[in-house]
Image: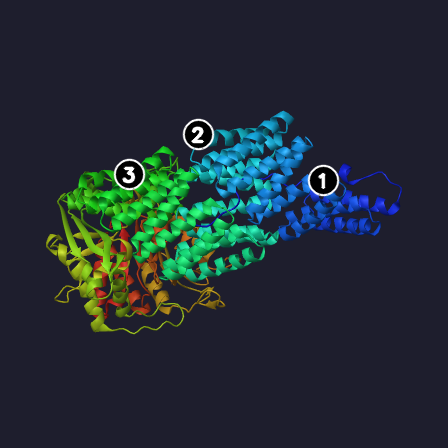
């Protein structure tokens, strides 16, 4: 994957001190040159590189004019240092080479050694490890010959860093131990601290965490003692990465943020950029992609500000990886190609190799395996040229995965075995484990589950040995899957439960957004466990896992707020007895869906496809029924899938009105009817016999994935009868959320009603990058508000009165909130979904889900009579959008829409709803009656079926 920032401490180039540069002389020109040199050194030491550059250049001109070769050499050396710090390493090499010639001319052994050492460092950062080692070895020889212990220490330290970068950890340790002895002999605490840090990393890379952490902790203590903030920040950053690799994301993020703070305090931009990159990597790993991209962008901004091409390459590489993970392959390719060009121009061979590897991953993902193999081969050639065992191993591993995708299992195994040999050679236990896991996956793909299990067990043993809980969880997941496929359901169940236990521990300490994202990544394990339990006819246990595998972040969020945020509350997922009790308290029939996928051979290639729909029906009496629906015919015969069926069903209904700007629809009534019947056949028919026969009895649907967008009231049976004609319908993101909304209902304290209709609309860009346009007025919404307000004994806020600031003041006091306006959908992030209100002052008039999320509301019901207010970003935690934010803010019942609702029919439906609510406080029954009445006047489902009630009915 992406090669991130350099993680070890170099012994930086030797800066000539004033005493080295100055010599007593009466010559005015020489004195001026010496003054400029001293001025340049002061500027260099305070980070004023451009100013120092000018000073040294002026000094060089004078020394050359007066033919002072020693002064010329010193100026050349100082200019080399400036260009090194500016990241212009080729220029640095040119100046140090000239300095070296002059030092040898005067037989200046100390100056010769320093020039050689500086050349070694420049070649090191360019990725030319062979030349770097050659120059540092020459530096070491000279330092020993003239008994210059500090120079010897510097050379040894740099050799240790180079071997560390190459993955030759044993050799790195050998050199770094010598540095440690000399540093202590010289009482050079700065070098001692760096050596301790690098020794710690060398042992960590060999998966010797006990010794590695011990060295890093010692380095940290020493850095704080001598106030070496740079080393302190680096060590803290590495500790953060170690905790991340061990699955302790909360602690890891905390350390990385401390590292970022130190870099900002000491104004060390490279350290700041590295911290941003590492933090971005964590959030990418946990699935919080928006935040990951933001951190990578900040790293890139810093790199460009300081004009450091190497940091820029790392940032571009990370952005490429981020967009690759998001599935935006075009943008990922753009960033990586930009980085590749810069890496080639610097040149940076390690950067080139890393980017080529990632370009290979993109090619593989978009179905271009031949191109992928070409990229990985180029990366492999560079890695072998610079003797970088780490990158060589990654390239070999990725080649193995590319051939695996091609179905060439022989080559896939061969390349993985080569990576395994390197991992074992450098004692990289983490890579060794992952390679064994890959080998297990390849054998399992050939249905050799015995060998697949054997390799996964080896990976598991290593992961536990080095305390890599992320890999441990992945190995347990794979073992569970392979045991399931081989028919050993008991062991499969045990492995998957252990994997889930570890995965759930990873979410501790993360914020809500990160929990949602990481949960999406982990959801597959819950699905496989459901399959294993159903295979054993443990249908009740499977329902417990289905419930445990959804809306967990939402449950924790509501629970925490119910407890007034007094510490993080992590309620346990409900048992089957608790689920039955919830159904009883709700006096409702609960219907929970779970979409199950599996691996299939399609056109000779393994593909993951929808397999079955699991459905549980829990009656208020405590009776639980399990049914299945076969989803395979959707893609085998109909050339579609469940997601596409839901989308085409909605599109064929043909919605219009209250949409934004000029959106046209082409309703197709026969197609709509067919799609609604097909959805009924899949979702309702398998359980129709166990649903309540009395129409007033409530049915609460617990959808998953795209099923959140299904208009359940509009589903039609084979006779054309709509589901709302037979049942009173609600929805919820999970069964446990119902338990919590019931608690919220008991805490409602609002007194008044707030009704908003047709505000003076704000401006909003139709598309990203287009100029904002004013949203069109909604006269039907105004009529709706004026009709509803008297029923709720209040005055509506219309037009200019409905400002965002006025509404925000009234929201916490209201018991019933009705907002009839435009809704703006954000199905990328979710929290940018918004309600349109009248702008005032500096606000833009948009009340976003993110802003609602932070409110404390006391309403028993919020009705969002607007477009798409029930939509947002669909996740394993439910829909991230307005409805989730309102419930999080304390609202037990929320009514939202699933599409752009028509203006006039919606006004009629809402008036009917509140009139019914006056007669009967049951909100679900009031909505059902309103739909039935509206249906008579407007028979098309687009006009009456958009709204859904989430949460409590009473």
Q: Which mark is residue 726?
A: none
Whether 443 is drawn above or below 866: the answer is above
Look at the numbered disc 2 and give the secondary structure of its residue.
helix
For the residues labelled 3 and 2, say whether their Cβ atoms are less than 8 Å apart: no
Dot 3 crowding, Cα within 10 Å, few <14, some 14–19, many 20+ = many
Residue 529 at what x, y percent from top left? 23, 44
Q: Is residue 671 left or right of residue 891?
A: left
In this figure, what is the number of numbered marks?
Answer: 3
Q: Which residue is mark 1?
A: 111
The front one of 693 and 767 is 767
Q: Earlier in the sequence, mark 2 or mark 1?
A: 1
Judging from the image, what secondary structure is the residue with disc 3 in? helix
For this view, does 231 lie left or right of residue 509? Answer: right
| Side (left or right) of 668 relative to 381 | left
Nearer to us in this view, 888 or 624: 624
Tell which circle, 3 or 2, labels the residue nearer the N-terminal end. Answer: 2
Q: Does residue 770 appear anywhere in the picture? A: yes
Say which residue appears at 30% left-offset and 52% top-offset.
410
- Disc 2 vs disc 1: Cβ atoms closer than 8 Å? no
Residue for badge 3: 457
User: Distance of mark 2 from mark 1, alpha carbons?
Assistant: 41 Å
Of circles 2 and 1, the one toward us is 1
The residue identified by callout 2 is: 210
Residue 516 visible in this rendered orientation of the protein: no
The colour scheme used here is: rainbow
Question: Seen in the image, is 527 located left or right of residue 23?
Answer: left
Residue 899 vertical position relative to residue 18 in the rendered view, above or below: below
Mark 1: few/some/many CA within 10 Å (<14, 14-19, 20+): many
């Amino acid at each position: 994957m992406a090669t991130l920032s350099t993680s070890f401490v170099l012994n930086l180039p030797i800066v000539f001190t004033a005493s080295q540069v100055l010599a007593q002389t009466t010559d005015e020109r020489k004195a001026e040159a010496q003054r400029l040199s001293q001025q340049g050194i002061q500027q260099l030491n305070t980070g004023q590189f451009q100013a120092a550059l000018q000073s040294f250049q002026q000094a060089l001109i004078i020394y050359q004019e007066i033919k002072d070769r020693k002064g010329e050499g010193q100026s050349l050396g100082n200019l080399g240092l400036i260009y090194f710090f500016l990241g212009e390493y080729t220029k640095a090499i040119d100046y140090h080479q000239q300095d070296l010639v002059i030092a040898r001319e005067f037989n200046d052994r100390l100056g010769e050694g320093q020039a050689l050492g500086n050349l070694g460092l420049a070649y090191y950062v360019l990725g030319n490890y062979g030349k770097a080692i050659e120059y540092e070895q020459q530096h070491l020889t000279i330092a020993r010959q003239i008994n210059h212990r500090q120079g010897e220490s510097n050379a040894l330290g740099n050799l240790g860093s180079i071997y560390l970068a190459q993955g030759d950890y044993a050799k790195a340790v050998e050199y770094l131990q010598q540095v440690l002895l000399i540093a202590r002999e010289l009482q050079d605490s700065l070098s001692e601290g760096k050596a301790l840090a690098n020794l710690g990393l060398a042992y960590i890379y060999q998966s010797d965490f006990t010794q590695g952490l011990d060295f890093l902790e010692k380095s940290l203590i020493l850095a704080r003692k001598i106030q070496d903030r740079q080393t302190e920040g680096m060590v803290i950053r590495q500790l953060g990465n170690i905790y991340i690799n061990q699955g302790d994301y909360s602690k890891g993020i905390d350390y990385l943020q401390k590292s970022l703070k130190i870099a900002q305090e000491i104004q060390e931009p490279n350290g700041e950029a590295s911290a941003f990159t590492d933090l971005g990597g964590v959030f990418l790993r946990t699935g919080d992609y928006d935040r990951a991209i933001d951190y990578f962008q900040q790293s890139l901004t810093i790199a460009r500000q300081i004009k450091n091409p190497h940091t820029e390459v790392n940032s571009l590489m990370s952005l490429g990886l981020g967009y690759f993970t998001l599935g935006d392959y075009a943008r990922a390719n753009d960033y990586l190609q930009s980085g590749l060009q810069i890496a080639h121009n610097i040149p940076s061979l390690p950067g080139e190799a890393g980017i080529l590897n990632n370009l290979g991953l993109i090619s593989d993902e978009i179905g271009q395996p031949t191109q992928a193999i070409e990229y990985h081969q180029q990366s492999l050639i560079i890695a072998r040229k610079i003797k970088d065992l780490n990158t060589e191993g990654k390239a070999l591993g990725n080649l193995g995965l590319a051939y695996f995708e091609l179905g060439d299992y022989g080559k896939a195994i061969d390349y993985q075995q080569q990576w395994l040999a390197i991992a074992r050679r450098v004692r990289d236990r983490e890579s060794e484990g992952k390679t064994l896991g890959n080998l297990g996956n390849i054998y399992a793909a050939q249905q050799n589950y015995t060998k697949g299990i054997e390799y996964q067990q080896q990976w598991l043993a290593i992961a536990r040995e080095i305390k890599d809980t992320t890999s441990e969880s992945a190995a347990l997941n794979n073992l569970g899957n392979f045991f399931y496929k081989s028919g050993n359901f008991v062991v499969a169940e045990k492995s998957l439960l252990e994997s889930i236990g570890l995965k759930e521990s990873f979410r501790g300490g993360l914020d809500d957004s990160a929990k949602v994202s990481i949960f999406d990544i982990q959801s597959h394990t819950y699905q496989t466990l459901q399959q294993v339990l159903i295979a054993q006819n443990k249908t009740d246990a499977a329902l417990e896992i289905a419930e445990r595998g959804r809306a967990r972040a939402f449950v924790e969020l509501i629970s925490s707020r119910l407890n007034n945020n007094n510490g993080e509350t992590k309620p346990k997922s409900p048992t089957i007895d608790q689920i039955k009790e919830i159904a009883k308290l709700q006096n409702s029939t609960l219907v929970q869906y779970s979409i199950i996928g599996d691996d299939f051979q399609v056109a000779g290639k393994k593909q993951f496809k929808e397999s079955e729909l699991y459905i549980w029906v829990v009656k208020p009496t405590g009776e639980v029924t399990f049914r299945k629906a076969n989803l395979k015919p959707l893609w085998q015969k109909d050339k579609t899938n469940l997601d596409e069926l839901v989308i085409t069903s909605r599109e064929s209904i043909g919605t219009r009105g209250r949409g934004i700007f000029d959106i046209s629809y082409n309703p197709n009534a026969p197609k709509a009817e067919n799609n609604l019947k097909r959805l009924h056949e899949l979702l309702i028919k398998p359980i129709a016999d166990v649903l309540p026969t009395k129409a007033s009895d409530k049915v609460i649907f617990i959808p998953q994935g795209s099923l959140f967008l299904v208009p359940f009231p509009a589903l039609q049976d084979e006779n054309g009868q709509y589901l709302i004609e037979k049942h009173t319908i609600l929805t919820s993101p999970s069964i446990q959320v119902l338990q919590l909304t019931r608690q919220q209902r008991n805490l409602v304290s609002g007194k008044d009603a707030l009704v908003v209709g047709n505000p003076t609309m704000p401006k909003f860009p139709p598309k990203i990058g287009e100029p904002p346009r004013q949203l069109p007025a909604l006269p039907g919404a105004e009529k709706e508000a004026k009709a509803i307000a008297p029923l709720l004994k209040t005055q509506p806020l219309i037009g200019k009165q409905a400002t965002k600031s006025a509404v925000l003041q009234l929201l916490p006091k209201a018991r019933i909130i009705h907002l009839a306006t435009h809704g703006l959908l954000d199905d990328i992030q979710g929290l940018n979904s918004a309600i349109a209100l009248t702008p005032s002052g500096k606000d833009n008039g948009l009340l976003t889900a993110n802003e609602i999320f932070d409110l404390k509301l006391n309403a028993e019901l919020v009705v969002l009579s607007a477009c798409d207010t029930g939509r947002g970003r669909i996740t394993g935690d439910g829909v991230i959008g307005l409805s989730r934010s309102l419930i999080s803010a304390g609202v037990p019942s929320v009514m939202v829409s699933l599409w752009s609702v028509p203006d006039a029919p919606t006004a009629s439906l809402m008036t009917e709803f509140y009139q019914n609510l006056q007669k009967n406080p049951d909100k679900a029954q009031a909505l059902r009656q309103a739909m039935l009445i509206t249906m008579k006047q407007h028979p098309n489902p687009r006009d009456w079926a958009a709204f859904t009630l989430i949460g409590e009915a009473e």
